[in-house]
Image (cartoon, rainbow, N blue to C red):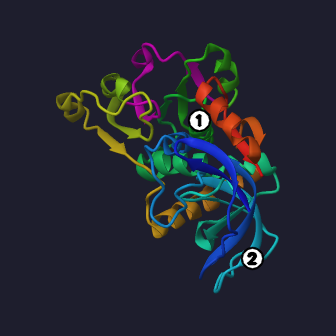
Amino acid sequence: MKAATIRDGRLLFEEHQDPEPGAGEVLVRVRAAGLNGADILQRRGLYPAPPGAPQDIPGMELAGEVALLGHGATRFAPGARVMAVVGGGAQAELAVVHERLLMPVPDQLDWPAAGGFPEVFTVAHDALITQAALAPGERLLVHGAAGGVGTAAIQLGHALGARVTATVRNAELREQVAALGTTVIAPEGFGEHGPFDVILELVGAPNLAENVNALATGGRIAVIGIGAGAKGDLHLGALMGKRARVMGSTLRARPLEEKALAARLVERHVLPQVESGALRVPVAATYPLAEAEAAYERFAAGGKLGKIVLLP
């Protein structure tokens, strides 16, 4: 098989030996693989894949067809359309995935949308619903909302019945983001639009102090992105006075059991909304897998709405 391959910080398109599924695993013929910020960091040597995942082939989400079943794998039949969050290796023609991580691809999703779905909707659902316990009627603020996780979070919050506000720096994208079911504001002075019950932090530490000030009593801050910085000042007195919580999370390094549970929750609670048309996957651009370098450059340039997806 061929795959996007990291060599000394460069991104190449190279030949690799075809992987073989082990017990409980499935070989997937990849039709689409979403690009994420973690892939950019991995290429720079800053975010290695977890043990057991390919270290030189990036990619954390994929969609494709079941090509071969490993011993004991029975959940999906050969030819089934599946998608999953993986530890690495998604940006390839073939990938091995444990069957418990796989989700069925709804008919409503074409390959590019399916390839851009698993990571962002799983991360957003886990952060907002499982961890922050967002409830109907609560006020949600999503920072950095034009990206993949941001657009997923807006839609999940809106579908739940929360009142959603989103910060978007690029003024040209605000109208399109608003169409997903949110009030869109500039990042500057966002605290004036509170108080918020839940804040999803996708930008990083520069927002921390104002996030705390903008919280309602009993509010929660879920941190899942630190691209603008990882260290900031936290006023513990303000946090105590509001009986508030700050929580952080990553998905990639979790053990199989926890990833499988997150996949089942998405499968049970999110996929029906995809099937009904309530949720969609905005795709900013697609690139052939052989042009992964160009896709990475487009991702790094910013100014996009939704996902960039590679197509083997």
Mark 2 lies on a secondary structure that is strand
- 251 or 177, which lies in front? 251
Above or below, comparing residue 133 to residue 302 in the picture: below
State left or right for residue 218 relative to residue 26. left
Residue with the most extreme front position: 8
- 184 or 22, which lies in front? 22
- 37 or 181, which lies in front? 37
Mark 2 surroundings within 10 Å by alpha-carbon count, few (fewer than 14), some (14 through 19), many (20 or more): some
Q: Residue at x 41, y 46 (%)?
A: 132
Give the image location of residue 18, x and y in percent.
70, 69
Residue marked by disc 1: 154
Give the image location of residue 169, x and y in percent.
55, 18
Question: Residue 11: which quarter of the image?
Answer: top right
Q: Is residue 199 magenta?
A: yes
Question: Residue 233: which quarter of the image?
Answer: top left
As shown in the figure, which amino acid type bears the numbered disc 1? Answer: Ile
The reply to whether residue 109 is visible in this rendering is: no
Which span is picked out in magenta? 181-204
